[in-house]
Image: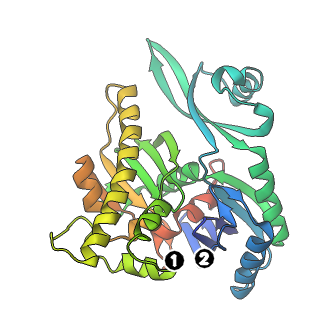
Amino acid sequence: MISIDLGSYETKIIEGKVNRDGIKVNKAFSFDTPKNSYKNGYIKNEEELINKTKEELKKNRLTSGNCYINIKSTAVITREIVFPLLGDKEIEGLLKYQLPEYLPMDSGKYIIQHKPLDKINVEGSEKLNVLVVAIPREMVDAHFSFIKELGLRPTIMDYQCNALWKLLKHSNKINDDISIADRTIAAIDLGYDTTSITIIKNGIMQFSRVLDIGGFNMDSNLSSLISLENEELLAKKMEITDVSIIDGGYSDYNRMINIIKTSLEGIMERADKVFKYYIFKETENEIQNIILYGGLSGIKGIDKLFNGYFNVSTSIINDLDKINTQNDVKKYINCFGALLRDDEVYY
């Protein structure tokens, strides 16, 4: 199976398969997404994006097969809605006829999916907490067309937060020391256009949000100090020894650290509002671990920065159980998660 993670800055692709031992990756590669061809889940220049992706697939000898793709966008609406204890068909019927009561939108312009999360107690009565995801129809159609034009077979489209949850549930442990089954974990994907937050409690997804802030804001701020192209700017950021430390001296390096730190604080402030919303929903809600992945998680010392800001143990995802690959795990997480299906038993 081929799994594609389109990003406005970088596109990641893997070829792999899933069995009871985990995910075996045969190939993994990435390339710079053509400038202004993909933004916030929307394909802006289909021809350029198709041509570049075709070129990279051919280079890596992947020209046919089933394709799994996932998306992340602030245009995707997610809500956690409490229902009576009903079956899938009954919930689907309720959503079909009563959706405006739950989500004020033109439902004809969206593809609606739902997923039961867990049973909860509401005023002494057992209810079902359901994740409802509404994806713009034009976004779905554009991705379907994109995959077809690549010569691949569109098989599954997934929402990135859901893909992340499936992956963590499948893996059991993060970095060999964080157990997913008995912790409340906030997983933060530090992307270029957006930042997504998925909260998982005792192995069950509770909540997800996508924020319209990311690495682009940082690069825009850095451009006032240094005028460099994407790859050169990335190299500069990777030279940082510890973004959580500024020695107080006046130098271009310290100025760069200060700009990056300030930009990351902007992301943390937005994330803090999401955390507080989740914590105030239920008295027993808390965040016990923060895990970071995505492009910005490669900045050295970013975990210390988050740990100091939130006073919550923070780690960068470097290893997951049941992922058989020599590649950078945190980079391809969305690709791995897309390969997993909730309703399949792996042999």
- Image position of 299 with respect to 196: above or below: below
The image quadrant of residue 33 is bottom right
Q: Which residue is located at x 47 percent, y 46 percent?
A: 198
Q: Amino acid at mark 1?
A: Asn
Q: For this rendering, which residue is in front, 136 or 248?
A: 248
**Residue under circle 1?**
230
Q: Is residue 11 left or right of residue 261?
A: right
Q: Nearer the viewer, mark 1 or mark 2?
A: 1
Q: For this rendering, which residue is in front, 342 or 131?
A: 131
Residue 317 location in percent, x, y?
39, 64
Q: Which residue is located at x 62 percent, y 55 percent?
A: 40
Residues at marks 1 and 2 touching, judged by CB atoms closer than 8 Å: yes
Hey, which residue is sitting farthest bottom in the picture? 59
Q: Is residue 101 left or right of residue 196?
A: right
Residue 48 location in percent, x, y?
76, 73
Q: Amino acid at mark 2?
A: Asp
Residue 69 location in percent, x, y?
68, 60
- Which mark is first along the chain, 2 or 1? 2
**Residue under circle 2?**
32
Q: For this rendering, which residue is in front, 17 or 34?
A: 34
Hey, which residue is sitting farthest front in the picture? 224
